[in-house]
Image (cartoon, rainbow, N blue to C red):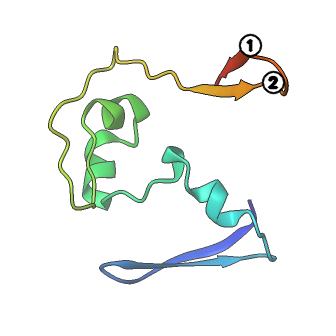
Amino acid sequence: MGIKSIEALDDSTVKFTLCSADPAFLYKIADDSFAILDADYLNETGGDSNKISENPVGTGPYKLKEWSSSLLRVRWAHRRRAFSSSASCRTL
């Protein structure tokens, strides 16, 4: 991804310095695998993605009330074809 450095400027600001311009950078770091987590929490879980998934932490205004590993969310893209009443769907 070409990250030269990552620096915590204060308790709520992170500075990323890239090796070169990357217009897709924000899209890339929006993925869950790039979540910024508390260092103590990472040490406690050893960075194990399964442990982190089973006991998630967050920094936003909401608190997780309930979580189920068996929950599956399926979204559908629904398009109507021109001059036809039939519809085609695909799973996202």
Residue 12 is situated, as x and y percent measured from the top left of the image, at 33, 78
- For marks 1 and 2, the one nearer the N-term is 2
Q: In which quarter of the image is residue 37?
A: bottom left
Q: How far apart are marks 1 and 2 (CA)?
A: 7 Å
**Cβ atoms at labels 1 and 2 below 8 Å apart:** yes
The C terminus appears in which quarter of the rendering? top right
Q: Which of 6 and 58 is in front in this view?
A: 58
Q: Which amino acid does label 2 sit on?
A: Arg
Say above or below: 32 vs 21. above
The secondary element bearing badge 2 is classed as: loop
Residue at coordinates 65% horizontally, 58% vertically from top-left? Answer: 27
Q: Which amino acid does label 1 sit on?
A: Ser
Residue at coordinates 44% horizontally, 23% vertically from top-left? Answer: 73
The secondary element bearing badge 1 is classed as: loop
Residue 74 is situated, as x and y percent measured from the top left of the image, at 51, 21
Say above or below: 40 vs 15. above
Quickly name the residue at label 2. Answer: 81
Q: Nearer the viewer, residue 4 or 16?
A: 16
Q: In this view, does 30 lie to the left or right of 10?
A: right
Quickly name the residue at label 1. Answer: 86
